[in-house]
Amino acid sequence: MSNEAEQSSLALDEPTTYLTFTMDGEFFATDITRVREVLEYRHVTKVPRTPDYMRGVINLRGSVVPVVDLRFQLGMGPTERTVDTSIVILEVQIDNHLTLLGALTDSVQEVVDFKSEALEPAPRLGTRVNSEFIQSMAKHDNKFVIILDLVRLFSASQLGDVLERGPLDVNKSIEEVVTDDAHEATTV
């Protein structure tokens, strides 16, 4: 085997790193390369006339970032706020544009590596999540981890219209969002 072929073979065996999180008692994951940061739950400003899965927007260092309730979008009911509730800031490709999006989760767990041979295709039956959003499944610490396909989950048909409208339809300027967040920080 040539040195180039060995390097190519080794590259195929490289594990992919995932961020794991829970929703409704189930374990999920997403490729860590899509994760920008993880935030503790903070005030989310509601936006009128948006779909139910859109919880609102947050101020992230001067940028308005929409927050989506993953549980609600996956048909698990709305996320109930607890001490562990987190917002995972993701970079998602929507209509050929890289978009920041907050994903509300019950709790963030850990960062894990899965080799490609540890990943299995999503079963057609037996999961509570529509399998079109499942990239693959893996087993970790005797639990199944559902690896979400964020490209399909946050498709243009679902979120494109909301994100395309941008801050003008949000009915709040960035100054109002910043003021709301500052007010909540001082009242808590």
Image (tube, rainbow, N blue to C red):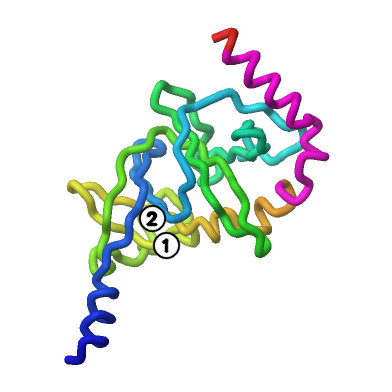
Who's the residue at 41% across and 38% down the image? 23
Which amino acid, mark 2?
A: Ile
* Residue beneath disc 1: 135
Above or below, 141 relative to 9: above
In this rendering, the count of numbered labels is 2
Tag shown at residue 118: none
| Residue at the top extreme, as displayed | 187
**Residue 13's spot in the image, x, y percent?**
24, 71
Magenta region includes residue 184: yes
Given residues 80 and 68, the one toward you in this image is 68
**Residue 115's spot in the image, x, y percent?**
25, 64
Which amino acid, mark 1?
A: Gln
Given residues 156 and 130, the one toward you in this image is 156
Who's the residue at 23% across and 47% down the image? 143
Above or below, 154 relative to 172: below
Task: State the predominant SS element of the stretch in magenta.
Answer: helix
Tag shown at residue 147: 2
Given residues 137 and 1, the one toward you in this image is 1
SS for dot 2: strand
Who's the residue at 42% across and 48% down the image? 128
**Is there a contact, CB below 8 Å, between mark 2 and mark 1?**
yes
Alpha carbon separation for disc pair 2 and 1: 6 Å
Who's the residue at 20% across and 91% down the image? 2
| Residue at the bottom extreme, as displayed | 1
| Residue at the front extreme, as displayed | 3
Q: Which residues are magenta?
A: 163-185
Above or below, 95 relative to 37: below
Horizontally, is 6 left or right of 108 in the view? Answer: left
- Residue 166 occupies quadrant: top right
